[in-house]
Amino acid sequence: MVNTGVLPTRDLWITDVSTGKTELKYAREDGEFRGISWTPDNRSVVVLESNWRKNPKEQIVVYPVDGGDPIRKDAPTNKLQGLWLSPDGRRMLTVRRESKLQVWALDSFLPAWK
């Protein structure tokens, strides 16, 4: 999946390319996605969200594809753009909108993938 940075959307849609079936998985009232990446096992999507009206901190949210409650965690800093997971899912890369490149390892937040 190509990461496009800020996504002008509030909803998360997933399409099964083999069947062409598209489903709305999660609908939001406001805010925006600032980055999105699949988990290595393809069971979840990790999203960098910004919703200044409800929370002054950006959040990293794991949305299970098959439903269930999302897992939320405040991002380590604000003004982030884009989100990429390493192939094993142990590291997350994001770029801060102040031209600084920062890499974080968020232990015990994402599940272990095999």
Image (cartoon, helix red, strand yellow):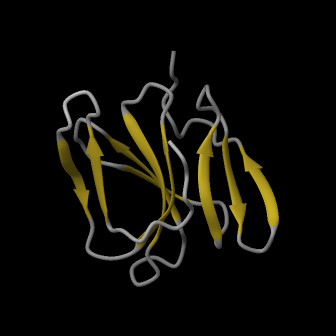
The picture places residue 74, in percent across and down from the top left corner, at 54, 61
Q: Who is closer to the viewer here, 30 or 108?
A: 30
**Residue drawn at x 80%, y 58% as measured from the top left:** 101
**Residue drawn at x 27%, y 52% as measured from the top left:** 13
Q: Residue furthest top?
A: 114
| 82 vs 54: above or below | above
**Residue drawn at x 26%, y 34% as measured from the top left:** 16
The picture places residue 91, in percent across and down from the top left corner, at 67, 38
| 74 vs 93: above or below | below
For residue 55, side relative to residue 19 (left or right): right
Q: Residue furthest right?
A: 100
**Residue drawn at x 75%, y 49% as measured from the top left:** 103
The picture places residue 94, in percent across and down from the top left corner, at 67, 55
| 29 vs 86: above or below | below
For residue 63, side relative to residue 68 (left or right): right
Tell me which corner region of the image, top left, top right, bottom left or bottom right, holds residue 89. Answer: top right
Q: Who is closer to the viewer here, 63 or 18?
A: 18
| 25 vs 81: above or below | above
